[in-house]
Amino acid sequence: MVHRQFAALADPTRLAIVERLARGPTSAGDLAAPTTMSLPAVLKHLRVLEEAGLVTTVKRGRVRECRLRDDALVAVATWTAQQQALWSTRLDALGTLLEDT
Amino acid sequence: MVHRQFAALADPTRLAIVERLARGPTSAGDLAAPTTMSLPAVLKHLRVLEEAGLVTTVKRGRVRECRLRDDALVAVATWTAQQQALWSTRLDALGTLLEDT
DNA sequence: GCAACAGTTAACCGCGTGGTTCACCGTCAG
DNA sequence: CTGACGGTGAACCACGCGGTTAACTGTTGC
């Protein structure tokens, strides 16, 4: 299930959007402005991020406000920590094995 | 630069390979065995993981041994922690702002 | 030395993804 | 009321990605 988040973060544009939103919420237009991309393209990216559970957006009047979800990256963080733990314990096991011989 | 790792982890097959390798090194054939995929497909995935700096492979005789890199996930972990920190401090700032008013 | 086995390379294919443009809708300001 | 502005939906397109098969190379075991 975490590969959905990874897929969302795989695209440089989407990664930049997340980094931008970590500094605070903003509108879809403001996200598109600094880029060379058209608005519809950015909207598509936002939809992907939203379906990956990384971002929430609300329509306020005619502007769509986008913010990073509080729990956006916990799945990624826990998965990463888990794999690191597994791999490092295996390295430790190898170390003590070499120590014993 | 971290989007390269994310792209590598975006594919379920590649994610499974990483999770498998976190339990210990193995051969390319052994990686392909439990799946329904052909060997060349797995080899391609391995190449992607290798170019993303997540995995190292060495050819020993006629078998290619694959292992997870020790520093495989540090880039991912640090990026994640960084964004979480930014976002949470902004939330904290908002909290104290509300407190003051 | 020969056969089987692990991997590699190349050519090919379908399809999803990232992008565009254009027409349209709702909303805010004057 | 009307015009401009932010966003939406649809149709379309190019390209890369994940997968296949097939033919070939090198290695190992008997």
Image: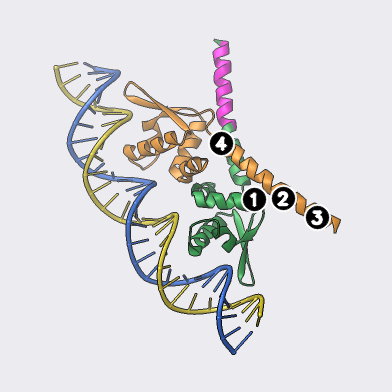
Chain colours: A orange, B green, C blue, D yellow
Q: Residues within 10 Å of mark 1 (few under 14, many from 20)?
A: many
Q: Are marks 3 and 1 on the same chain?
A: no
Report how far apart the C-alphas of labels 1 and 4 lie in the structure. Answer: 18 Å
Report how far apart the C-alphas of labels 3 and 1 lie in the structure. Answer: 18 Å
Report how far apart the C-alphas of labels 2 and 3 lie in the structure. Answer: 10 Å
Figure check: A65 above or below A84: above
The residue at which mark 4 appears reads as: A75
The chain identifier of the residue carrying mark 1 reads B
Mark 4 or mark 2: whose residue is earlier in sequence = 4
What is the secondary structure assignment of the residue under circle 1?
helix
Q: Main secondary structure of the magenta part?
A: helix
**Pointer 1 and pointer 2: residues touching (CB < 8 Å)?**
yes
The residue at which mark 2 appears reads as: A90
Q: Are marks 1 and 2 on the same chain?
A: no
**Pointer 4 and pointer 2: residues touching (CB < 8 Å)?**
no
Using the image as rendered, state which of residue C1 and residue B23 is in the foreground: C1
> On the picture, is B39 further left or further right than A60?
right
B96 magenta-colored: yes
The range drawn in magenta is B85-100
What is the secondary structure assignment of the residue under circle 4?
helix
The chain identifier of the residue carrying mark 4 reads A
The residue at which mark 3 appears reads as: A97
- Is any part of residue A31 visible from this angle? yes
Quarter of the rendering containing residue B65: bottom right
